[in-house]
Image: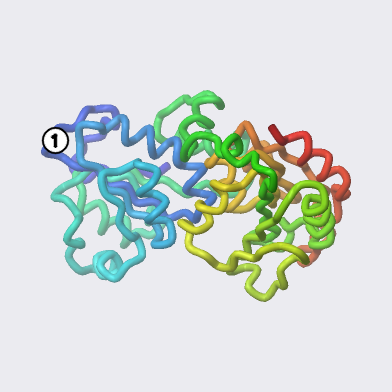
Amino acid sequence: MAVGRPNGRHDIRAPLSEANAVVVLFAGALGDFLLALPSLRHLRERHRAARCLLAVRTPLVWLAEQAGVADAVVALDDRAMASFLGGEPPPAWWPAAPRLYSWFGGSDAALRDRLCASARDVEFRHVVRGAGTMHAAEDYARAVGWDAAWNELVAAASLGPPVATAAATADPLLVVHRGAGAPAKRWRADGYAEVTAWWRAARGPVVELLGPAEHADAALAGTRPLREQPLRSVVEVLRTAYAYLGNDSGPSHLAGALGVCGVVVFGPTDPERWRPLSARLRVLRAAPPSGHADAIRDPPPDVVIACLAASLP
């Protein structure tokens, strides 16, 4: 962790008065944000006497507002911020001499200097990537000085009470997301097809989430596709879900935060480091594919079906 101290002061536990403000810049994507959410909530509690502003990528603004981790949420990638980072004055919402926590810009000397000049105290961190000795959420927590237990992280990652109890209808809904940011993370499409066919025959309807990475994919047979929808729509459908099935991806972390039960299939990534913060999502570890363009070949569909059935309330 790199730390900037424009005026020499650096006590991250010191209480702030109402006259001061805290700005948090977080540049990660959906899964990163949800893994960091407990730590962002911890920072908000630490500075509860101050006005807190959070800047995230535009697609995450609505979700960050719902999470309640700041008094105001703004876009990190809008024109005003781009102008500021390019050398213009700060955007209108930027407070005078805030305390700044930034998961952004620490490795760029010019940007780092620009941010340090606009805040009274600055701490730079990095969005968690790669292998490590602990879960990514624990990495985020340690970076803000919080020695959190696993159950504390799971509780702080929640976006509301579990939803499955309200979804136990005559036609329980399964939501699936077979995409992922990297092809090597994707369990094979015919496996998803077999599981969704079983669910439709034995239980009820299936909604398939299809994001930008799956824009060219045909929907699974018999499913209702939900293509490239804003997070608000994805949250709405997950709140009606009885169960979820997906890969190591942002929607899987979102399902976990919403309290949906189900299964997440992991391939080359380590679930001990990257699994969703949830006690209701089971993890299946598959053998990594032989090449980056290949789908994960195992576990067999009947194993996934058995694990999915066992996860249900």
Quadrant containing the N terminus is: top left
Disc 1, SS: loop
Residue depicted at 85% across the width and 56% down the height? 297
* Residue nearer the viewer, 265 or 47: 265
Q: Which of the two residues, 32 or 143, is positioned nearer the viewer here?
A: 32
Q: Nearer the viewer, residue 113 or 139?
A: 139
Question: On the picture, is 160 further left or further right than 108?
Answer: right
- Percent from the top left, x then y, of residue 8? 21, 38
Q: Choose top left, top right, bottom left or bottom right for residue 37.
A: top left
Q: Quadrant of the C terminus?
A: top right
| Quarter location, residue 168 | top right
Residue visible at 50% across and 34% down in the picture: 161
Q: Kindly tell me whether residue 302 is visible in this rendering.
A: yes
Outermost left residue: 19
Picture quarter containing residue 176? bottom right
- Above or below, 108 relative to 3: below
Report the residue at 32% width, 44% height from top: 101
Residue corresponding to mark 1: 18
Percent across and percent down for residue 207 are: 66, 58
* Residue 149 at x, y percent in the picture: 53, 24
Classify mark 1: residues with Cα within 10 Å, few (<14), some (14-19) or many (20+): few
Query: What amino acid is labelled 1 in the image?
Result: Glu
Compared with 107, 83 (above or below) is below
